[in-house]
Image (cartoon, grey):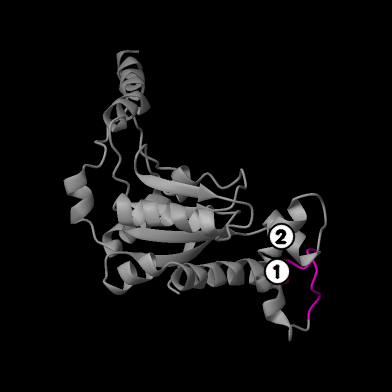
Amino acid sequence: MKKQSSILSTQTEGFVENVLTQEEQASLTPAKVMELLKEGNQRFVNSEVTLRNHKEQIRRSAANQFPKAIVLSCVDSRVPVEDVFDRGIGDVFVARVAGNFVNTDILGSMEFACKVSGAKLILVMGHEYCGAVKGAIDAVELGNITAMLEKIKPAVNSFSGYEGEKASSNAEFVHMVAEKNVQLNVEKIRQESPILQAMEAAGEIKIFGAMYDMETGQVNFMEL
């Protein structure tokens, strides 16, 4: 009983992970941040996530934030970004939009994250079985969803020579489009943000793509 009580006490107190300071953020390289994200994802996959005292982290991060990275993800509720990389409060910026595509607002957010706030890495993360990708493939028309899906159409139209069925029922084609959509949006970041392009050229940041496996929780990184 005493041993069990001790375990419960430890769980209640949590593991207080220090919130990243400006000095610690400045010392990080894009390669190191990528390594930390990969390590965190492996812990997530293995169900060995860090036990954190969120109340203490909230208190320590209230005045300032110095995140390591910004992740652009889909809004899909099955892709909990901070959990996927086993990150805590103040660790990463997260931008979310159905289909994880880039627009002016997202680019501005990325420029703020990197140029103003010092983040070292930009990650565009798509995922398997993406409803937005399926909608774009099937040319769904419904309210504002119609205009939103147009942002994903370039990825759909990239496969003019594909001989299989171009339908959301074709899992292979859905995967191909989702992966291509990540690639095109990484390219768009470089093309449409001179600030981020210059930062990457100078080695200050790195821009990556990734695909999240819905069945395993594994993030497969793509250097594009």
Magenta span: 164-173
- From what the image shows, is residue 131 above or below residue 2? below
Asked whether disc 2 touches disc 1, contact meaning CB atoms under 8 Å apart, the reply is yes
Q: Residue at 34% across / 56% down in the picture? A: 114
Instruction: Give residue 201's position: percent from left, percent from top.
Output: 31, 74
| Left or right of 21 on screen, residue 169 | right
- Image-quadrant location for residue 102: bottom right
Kindly identify which residue carries mark 2.
149
Is residue 19 visible in the rendered structure shown here? yes
Q: Main secondary structure of the magenta part?
A: loop
Q: Is disc 1 surrounded by few (<14), some (14 to 19) or many (20+) residues within 10 Å?
A: some
| Left or right of 175 on screen, residue 5 | left
- From what the image shows, is residue 46 above or below residue 191? above
- Image-quadrant location for residue 47: top left
Instruction: Give residue 81's position: percent from left, percent from top.
Output: 49, 47
| Left or right of 141 on screen, residue 90 | left
Q: Residue 165: say if magenta.
A: yes
Identity, as a three-letter code, of the amino acid under mark 1: Lys
Quadrant of the snapshot with the N terminus:
top left
Direction bottom: furthest residue: 161
Q: Residue 166: say if magenta.
A: yes
Any mark on residue 153, and which? 1
Any mark on residue 70, and which? none
Q: Residue at 21% across / 45% down in the picture? A: 22
Instruction: Give residue 75's position: percent from left, percent from top.
Output: 60, 47
Q: CA distance from mark 2 to mark 1?
A: 7 Å
> 30 or 220: nearer the eye?
30
- Image-quadrant location for residue 176: bottom right
> 170 or 180: nearer the eye?
180
Quadrant of the snapshot with the C terminus:
bottom left
Identity, as a three-letter code, of the amino acid under mark 2: Leu
> 160 or 196: nearer the eye?
196
